[in-house]
Amino acid sequence: MKRQLSDLTFSLCSTIALTLLSIFILSGCGTSENNVSIGNRTGTLHWGNGTEPQSLDPHIATGVPEHKIIIALMEGLVLKDSKTLEPRPGVATSWDISEDGRVYTFHLRKNARWSNGDPHNAHDYVWSWWRALQPALGNLYAYMYFSIENAKEYYEGSIKDFDQVGVKALDDFTLQVRLKNPTPYFLQLLDHYSLYPVHRQTIEKFGGADERGTRWTYEGNLVGNGAFQLLEWKINRRVVVERNPHYWDAENIKLNKIVFYPTENAITEERMFRAGQLHYSGTVPADKVATYQSRNDPALHIDPYLGTYFYRLNVRVPHLQDKRVRRALGMTIDREQITQRILKAGQIPAYAMTPPNTMGYFPESDLAFNPEAAKQLLAEAGYPNGEGFPATEILYNTSEGHRKIAVAIQQMWKTHLNIDVKLLNQEWKVYLNSVSGRDYEIARAGWIGDYVDPNNFLDMFLCNGGNNRTGWCNKEYDRLILEEAPTAKTHAERLAIFTAAEKMLMEDMPVIPIYIYTSNNLVNTSVKNFNDNILNQPSFKEIYLEADTGVEN
Amino acid sequence: MAIKELQPDEQGTSLWQDAWIKLCKNYLALFGLAVLALLCVISLLTPWIAPYGYEEQNLLLGATAPSLEHWLGTDIFGRDMLTRIMYGGRVSLTVGFIATAVALLIGVLWGAVAGFVGGRTDAVMMRIVDIMYALPFMIFIVLLMVVFGRNILLLFVAIGAVEWLTMARIVRSQVMSLRKQEFVEAAHSLGLSEWTIIRRHIIPNTLGPVIVYTTLTIPSVMLLEAFLSFLGLGIQPPQSSWGLLINYGVESMEEYPWLLIFPGVALSLTLFALNFLGDGLRDALDPRTSKD
């Protein structure tokens, strides 16, 4: 019975699909060539970028879609190897590290240029980092600088003189950086966009150095030092970058152009990929993963990804102030079901913020799926059997993937705690504003590692961390992360401090970790030299396009 | 006494009686009426006759094709599709009827008055309609929702409040042509008040196109609701409507076709029923067709 019915529906569906397909073909584009084959011929990479970038200012942007565009437009002192993530020379050809690991001296290349041809030297870094630390700029990533001597003090205003911050141009091509403590991940930080240099003349032409949202990042204005330069930025349509002729390594860049498409709907993006409109798509709808897997499609890349999907709880909201309520919410999410039944692409249930095996670090956490204990906690907090629990909303940015998880969690809380929560979706920029303005109760979030170190997942919950956004503040936690961990003598001791800090975080639970990401990419087989790494960071410098003979249509 | 003798033996039938008799002879229209009535009854009784809860999940089960336990299959959360379609019908039918009724009320009155009074009043009224046409109606609805909050009943009214424009134009053009006709002139010369003429002569004569347009408005309103809900302005999960179910079904139509097909069938069935009924009603209500 079951079999027959499903066969019937299948044949019905395929008839409809065929009809639709023929309509598309008949009414569709006049040319038979798609983006991918044209791109392969002209060296244009068509990149599905998820969503419209919030900003292309490296000292303001915080999201992953922005990251992908900014790394094409700008470059830091040090790059990462696209396979091993080892440091590789960027603007700096070489660097010396002092014996105590606290003084880094970078030797900059003499042929580095901005995309308008201006010389690019060590003074650019001093000015750019000064800019990034201006409190008025509202740089949410300012804490990335805090390993540099006096950077935190300067940012917080206890030091007024920037000369005391540990950044100094010894001459035009030598930059010296003094750190507060030996920081094992410092070289990795330099490849993060918050430490990228920006072009002073351009920024000053369009407004103050610490002014947000000026027109310097717009089409025709933006000057960068990366392998590509901004050609076109059409809101909600595309961002186009072209090869920068002034780039120091320009002769080794093989791509002529990259077109970034903001497609908020993962299903649409997957269809664009299948129709040959995109070379790359960074999200695969959960239901489609199995389809690709079943036919062993070489386009599907599923790899470990250093990122955590979690829910932020606004601890300033009265009923979420009680940590028993937050714990109860965290304990009634059945993560196994979510990863196995909804996501289905190898994601790992998360019971702590840091993904396991981040530089040898395995978080310890007493968080588990335990509805009975959760009910008890909720009753102790004054809501026996969920009675009188105030109206609460889960906020997520518009996406079918986030919706599915929210729907499942909504029901889990209903079943196990007998509380009703509502769902609210917002477009990406509106959502970012709501979350950073703490205008939410529970909000979906994802944190993708900027560098491979547990510090990256834990220091965002410092009291004044720009990416904290929960209102949670614990002085002891701050002390562990800012003072104890950086001065630890051995790697093991450092990890032990992180373990203690993470336990505190999970005990208070301002965030509910849900799962550890996997990177699910769809990459056309004509894209060569695309290397998977756990940061899912592409190297546009290395990628080239080469159509497979015979497969081309 | 003399007057009494002059009365004919046969009683004249009213427009409505006449229409009902004609409608009863149109089997297709009756079929449409029956289907609609059935859908309304099912929707009303849903909380008592639905086989499962509309939010009842079974993640272990996941998406399954139609079977004996779940006649129309289950969605990826293991929720019974039959139940969800039944509950979705409640929302969709309500939004369809309420929003269309609002649109009908405003549109017909506005268009009839503008067309009948004419002159400067007509110009002002129709310019207002033009201005509202020029406003992107999505922005208009979004504004209404932001000002009045996310309330389902308000959503219905908000949709109705933007859907009346075309109706007003159709009615106005009909009225314009009617008001110059002899029977209206005759009514004028008999001294009937303007309002009585609108009510007794103008509106019944415009019913044909209005009914046809109404049957087209109902499904478009249902889809509009789905769109707004998708943007987070209408109803929110786990609640559902046919439009939303179709929207979600499209996402995985290759993997789980039944998630798209069954809500689609429900919506199409309603659409067909409405069209048949509308067609029949138009024929039955047209005062220009001869009486048998």
Image (cartoon, rainbow, N blue to C red):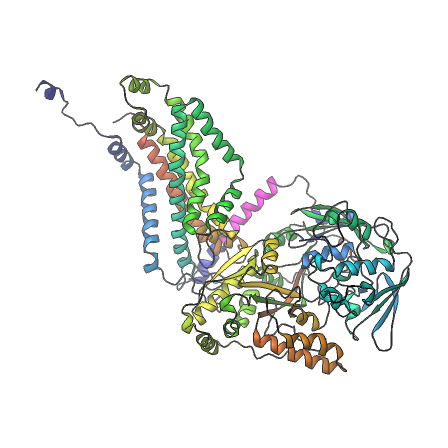
Can residue A545 be seen in the rendering of this structure? no
B154 w.r.t. A436: above or below: above
A286 w.r.t. A333: above or below: above
A296 w.r.t. B175: above or below: below
Query: Which residue is at 83% across, 74% downward?
Result: A102
A224 w.r.t. A448: above or below: above
Rendering coords of residue B289 (x, y %): 31, 26
* Quarter residue A360 falls in: bottom right
Q: Is residue A26 magenta?
A: yes
Give the residues in magenta. A11-30
- Quadrant placement of the N terminus of chain A: bottom left
Query: Which residue is at 40% across, 32% downward?
Result: B110
**Drawn side of residue A270 relative to residue A128, left or right:** left
Rendering coords of residue B37 (x, y %): 32, 47
Q: Residue furthest left?
A: B1
Rendering coords of residue B198 (x, y %): 33, 27
Query: Which residue is at 40% across, 49% downward?
Result: B153
Can residue A345 be seen in the rendering of this structure? yes
**Drawn side of residue A386 relative to residue A540, left or right:** left
Which of the two residues, B132 or A302, is positioned nearer the viewer here? B132
Query: Which residue is at 56% across, 69% downward?
Result: A339
Q: Is residue A205 magenta?
A: no
**Drawn side of residue A465 relative to residue A99, left or right:** left
The kind of secondary structure the magenta stretch mainly shows is: helix
Rendering coords of residue B189 (x, y %): 29, 16
